[in-house]
Amino acid sequence: MSTAQLHTGYQAELADFRVTFSRGGAYTAIVLVLLGVGLDYAQYPQLLTSFTAARLFVSLLIGGIVILLGSTVGRRFAPWLTLSWLLLPQIMISWMIWRTDGVLSPYFMGLNLAIFASGIALPFGLWQNLVFGVLSCGLYLAACLLHPGGIASTGTMTVNALLLLFAAAASAVYTFFNERIRFSLFRLKAEVSEKNGELEAINRKLLDIKGQLLQQEKMAAIGTLSAGLLHEVNNPVNFCLMAIEVALEEPAAKAEPVLQECLVDAKQGMQRIQHIVADLKTFAYRKADAEAEAKTPFLFERALDSALRLIGHELRGVAVVRELPPDTLVQGDEAAIVGVLINLFSNAALAMRKAGTAEPAIRIAARWEEHRLHVTVRDNGPGIADEHLARVFEPFFTTRDVGQGLGLGLSISYAVIERHGGLLYAESELGSWAAFSFDLSRAT
Ligand code: ADP
């Protein structure tokens, strides 16, 4: 955080602090001004009525300023409003000094008390404090000089005026250091919250990396499993298919429609197994594939066009928005990337249709970042629940009805992007949107 930012933040925080303290101080002032009736009673009983009226009037004015301080405008001008209510008792005391004994009035102590209190209790700035002190001194001098009975003692008046100025200087110095301490505390607080923010960012990154590592580990395990499965399943499936083909050619099968139908069903079942096994190949030979990563340059924009054309029928009624940079020359296996896009579009279209999204839309955005094209496919469908988000790339994970989806699309897409040296990941807000992002290398 820069010093300028720190100052702005500090001023904002100080503004709240000032308003709170100013109001607290104003309430105290009202109480003290009213309690002063006791002093009037003891010192000037003959003036009790007019002094009490003055005290009530000043208390009401201070009360009005307190109300103003609660408004937005009041908050903006809080330091000046504070100065105003502080001056009200000073004016009242000076008037009382003028009305009574002038220089000899003991009420001059009241002026001093207010100056000290403003320095200690109110979060005033250095200048405001000095202005307040000098104005109080000016009021005192005016009260003495204009006193109808004249100046009883010039020496006492000078001493009292100087004492007022000393009080102002002392409270200004006190304010100055107070302000510095407050600023240091604020800086410390800002630094701690900044460090906390950094720690949170690191934590999030670590969680991300952990998630990616887990995903990679899972994929590696699936790879080993698939390789074994391929080996074990491929041969028997091929035998079976061959056997079924032979059986289908047999005159007995041709003559018996029920038998023929059974054999055709068996053949279809076997072919389905063959397709699944073919999909699993993507996981089984990931290492070898990764090494032989295709480096053919192609325009991502063209791949996107192909995918949108091929999936056109499923995207009917869906608004498709594209935000691509002018140059999208990447490298890799164009057909595989088209496959990934088709899978993402088809998933999005299906999710939106199933959820009955009112204005279904898919946005494809791409941007270059350090020699890689980052692509995001986002839909405004139902989104993905948190507990599913971590599992969508798992092979055979599906929320579709039995027989509707194999749950292999995203896991195959993940492996394809991984083969291209990138990462496919999902983000979502349940009920609002789902986004799948991946990155491809710029053509060299
Ligand atoms: P399948 O489509 O066969 O279910 P996938 O691996 O392609 O398999 O997707 C796995 C699951 O991820 C889907 O069943 C669905 O629950 C979820 N999914 C994928 N894309 C989206 C999307 N755009 N919106 C909501 N859910 C999605």
Image (cartoon, rainbow, N blue to C red):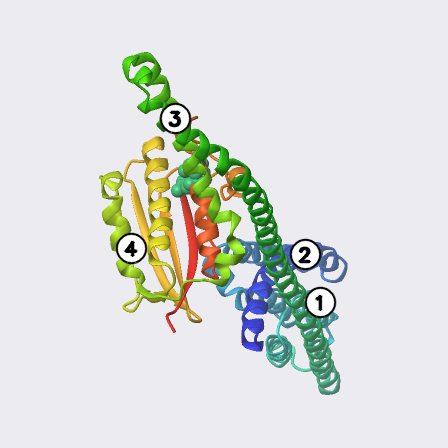
Helix, strand or loop under label 1:
helix
Q: Which is more foreground, mark 2 or mark 4?
A: 4
Task: Name the foreground residue: 441 vs 81.
Answer: 441
Q: Residues within 10 Å of mark 1 (few under 14, many from 20)?
A: some
Labels 3 and 4 touching (C-beta < 8 A): no
Look at mark 4 in the image and give the residue it sits on: 304
Q: Quadrant of the N terminus?
A: bottom right
Q: Which of the 4 image quarters holds residue 14?
A: bottom right
Count neighbours of disc 4 (C-alpha within 10 A) and say few if under 14, some if 14 to 19, many if 20 or more.
some
Q: Tell which tag, 4 or 1, sits nearer the viewer.
A: 4
State whether label 3 is within 8 Å of ligand 1.
Answer: no
Q: Residues within 10 Å of mark 3 (few under 14, many from 20)?
A: some
CA gap, disc 4 and disc 1: 74 Å
Q: Which mark is residue 117?
A: 1
* Label 1 close to label 2 by CB (< 8 Å): yes
The picture places residue 434, in percent across and down from the top left corner, at: 41, 45
Q: Position of residue 396 (x, y in %)?
A: 49, 36
- Amino acid type at mark 2: Thr
Is label 3 or label 4 in front? 3
Instruction: List the residue tagged with mark 2.
Output: 28
Which residue matches tag 3?
244
Pointer 3 or 1: first along the chain: 1
Secondary element under disc 2, as helix, strand or loop, is helix
Which one is nearer the viewer's eye here, 116 or 218?
218
Residue at the image point whose x is 57% and y is 73% from the top: 7
Task: Describe the element under mark 3 as helix, strand or loop.
Answer: helix
Work out whether 87 lies above or below 208: below
Q: Secondary structure at mark 4?
A: helix
Tell me what residue is drawn at x 36 percent, y 32 percent: 355
Q: Are marks 3 and 2 in contact (CB under 8 Å)?
A: no
- Which of the marked residues, 3 or 2, is nearer the chain's N terminus? 2
- Of mark 2 and mark 4, the one earlier in the sequence is 2
